[in-house]
Image (spheres, rainbow, N blue to C red):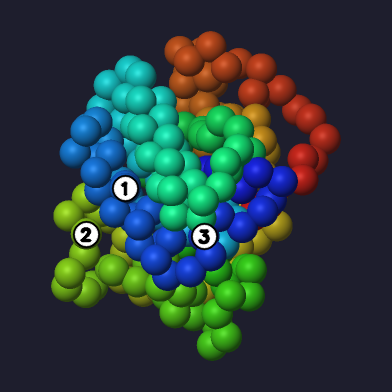
Amino acid sequence: MNRGNGRAEVFHNDGDYAAFLGLIGEACERVPVSVFGYCLMPNHFHLVVRPRGDGDLSRWMQWLMTSQVRRYHRHYHGSGHVWQGRFKAFPIQADEHLLTVLAYVERNPLRAKLVKRGKAADWSWLSLRWWGKRGRPPWLMDGPVKRPRGWARRVNLAADKQVREAMEVCIARGRPYGGDRWSKRVASRLGIESSLQPLGRPRVEP
């Protein structure tokens, strides 16, 4: 995820959102990254992706962020920082944990009260709106764990406090999200053992 510099809005209208989705498609053509879910909000975005090789995520995100900034300055005749800095990311175990993260990401518009009927899918710039429909972007994939039937209903249900707090920590520290043994193994392999240490609750934007 990443957010606008100083929490400022980055996506001002439908054209900005659509252009960013177009750039995601171009980025996937340049660097082999699979996209399983996304949510674009006025001042930040979430992506759930799987790179195929070492360094692919950084290269993919660098091209995406740089291209978006160029488009932003060209369109709005501006300069300077658009994003707050480097993107934040954390590994996710490809089981029920992945579904938990996808539900958390796709519930963002509802949590932020950007939709009125209690349905997250009413937000246009969200991967949830494509499931079970035609015309899905070719770069948006089912993922290693398919969303079950009744997925929209699950997304619309409020996440419990424990899940919200876990997401905050993972976003803030890059902590792997999965079972204990899996998380320790991944943290050791990536050299991020410190992310598993306990800490006070961080405050991050949902």
Horizontally, residue 174 falls left or right of residue 182, namely right
Q: Residues within 10 Å of mark 1 (few under 14, many from 20)?
A: some
Camera-side mark, 2 or 3: 3
- Mark 1 lies on residue: 23
Task: Residue at 21%, 33% (x, y): give it.
Answer: 30
- Mark 2 lies on residue: 137
Task: Residue at 53%, 19% (x, y): give it.
Answer: 187
Give the structural element (helix, strand or loop) at label 2.
loop
Task: Residue at 55%, 69% (x, y): give it.
Answer: 109
Q: Position of residue 10 (x, y in %)?
A: 55, 55
Work out how far the residue at label 3 is from the one at label 1, CA to CA, in angstroms: 14 Å
Give the structural element (helix, strand or loop) at label 3.
loop
Query: Can the viewer see residue 7?
Result: yes
- Residue type at tag 3: Phe
Image quadrant holding the C terminus, namely bottom right
Q: Residues within 10 Å of mark 3 (few under 14, many from 20)?
A: many
The tag earlier along the polypeptide, 2 or 1, is 1
